[in-house]
Image: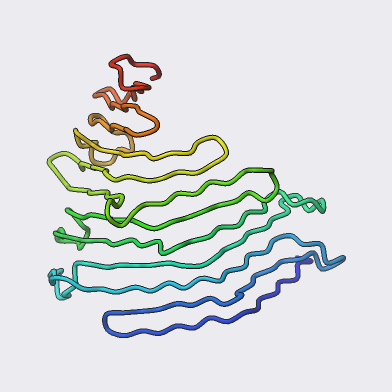
């Protein structure tokens, strides 16, 4: 109650059988306290999203689906929140999205149309700044030539996840390049959120190895020197 909501800006949408586009221009969603106009929250978006579907056809019951979907985003987003209504912003962040692309490739479906073999590929840049704190920002850039790739495959008893790719990170506490690889797939038993096997290796300006054990424990080897530093 006692909240005034304001919305403004423009949204344009276009669709075809294989493409779509959403464009938000100065799209603003603002909430203020009705009694005195105190800003409670504000979200502003200037973002363009374009998507395409293509590739080979997959059958799922009576439906036929194309197995590749791509989404690309560009633009800026800002968010402000006064969570306890005391006149001081608790959240004030802004984000710059630069040619951030995600492509989903589905190679197989089960009889309920859920993917059993799929890959997500990501590239582009995202920069997020906390405007409340000084020098509190992080930028992540993933080159299209070496994208971040996540593959999920259904296997007996669960699902295997593998991750690979390289990202350049710039922040107040770290600047450098990181490469991630999964020499042993990370295995999630059916119905569990805790892996019981697998290994992730990080190389570059920071090195380390993460190993998942059959008991559900996580072993962290900082520096990949063969010594477990954290569990």
**Residue name at image x 69 percent, y 43 percent:** 134
Q: Is residue 178 left or right of residue 48?
A: left
**Residue name at image x 51 percent, y 70 percent:** 47
Q: Position of residue 116 (x, y in %)?
A: 17, 53
| Quarter occupied by residue 22 | bottom left
Note whether 5 is above or below 159 in the view shown. Answer: below
Question: Where does the C terminus fall, quadrant-wise?
Answer: top left
**Residue name at image x 50 percent, y 44 percent:** 170
Q: Is residue 177 left or right of residue 45?
A: left
Note whether 131 is above or below 216 in the view shown. Answer: below
Q: Is residue 25 left or right of residue 199?
A: right
Note whether 4 is above or below 176 in the view shown. Answer: below
| Quarter occupied by residue 80 | bottom right
State the colouring used for the structure image: rainbow
Query: Residue 98 versus residue 105: which sits nearer the camera?
Result: 98
Tally of marks: 0
Query: Residue 200 versus residue 213: which sits nearer the camera?
Result: 200
Q: Position of residue 73 (x, y in %)?
A: 43, 67
| Quarter occupied by residue 65 | bottom left
Query: Residue 23 versus residue 191: which sits nearer the camera?
Result: 23
Q: Position of residue 1 (x, y in %)?
A: 75, 65
Q: Position of residue 20 (x, y in %)?
A: 36, 79
Residue lying at the far top in this picture: please name it. 227
């Amino acid at each position: 109650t006692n909240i005034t909501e304001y919305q403004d800006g423009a949204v344009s949408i276009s669709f075809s059988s294989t493409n779509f586009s959403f464009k938000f221009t100065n799209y603003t969603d603002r909430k203020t306290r009705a009694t005195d106009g105190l800003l409670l929250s504000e979200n502003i978006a200037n973002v363009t999203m374009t998507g395409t579907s293509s590739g080979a056809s997959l059958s799922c019951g009576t439906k036929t689906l194309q197995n590749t979907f791509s989404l690309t985003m560009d633009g800026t987003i800002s968010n402000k929140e006064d969570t306890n209504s005391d006149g001081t912003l608790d959240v004030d962040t802004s984000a710059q999205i630069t040619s951030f692309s995600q492509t989903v490739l589905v190679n197989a479906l089960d009889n309920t149309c859920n993917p059993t073999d799929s890959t997500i590929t990501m590239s582009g840049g995202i920069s997020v700044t906390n405007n409340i704190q000084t020098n509190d920002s992080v930028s992540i850039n993933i080159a299209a030539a070496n994208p971040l790739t996540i593959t999920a495959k259904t296997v007996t008893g669960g699902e295997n996840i593998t991750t690979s790719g390289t990202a350049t990170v710039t922040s107040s506490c770290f600047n450098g390049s990181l490469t991630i690889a999964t020499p042993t797939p990370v295995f999630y038993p059916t119905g569990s959120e805790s892996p019981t096997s697998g290994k992730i290796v990080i190389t570059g300006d920071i090195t380390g190895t993460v190993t998942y054990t059959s008991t559900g424990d996580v072993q962290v080897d900082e520096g990949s020197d063969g010594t477990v530093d954290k569990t």
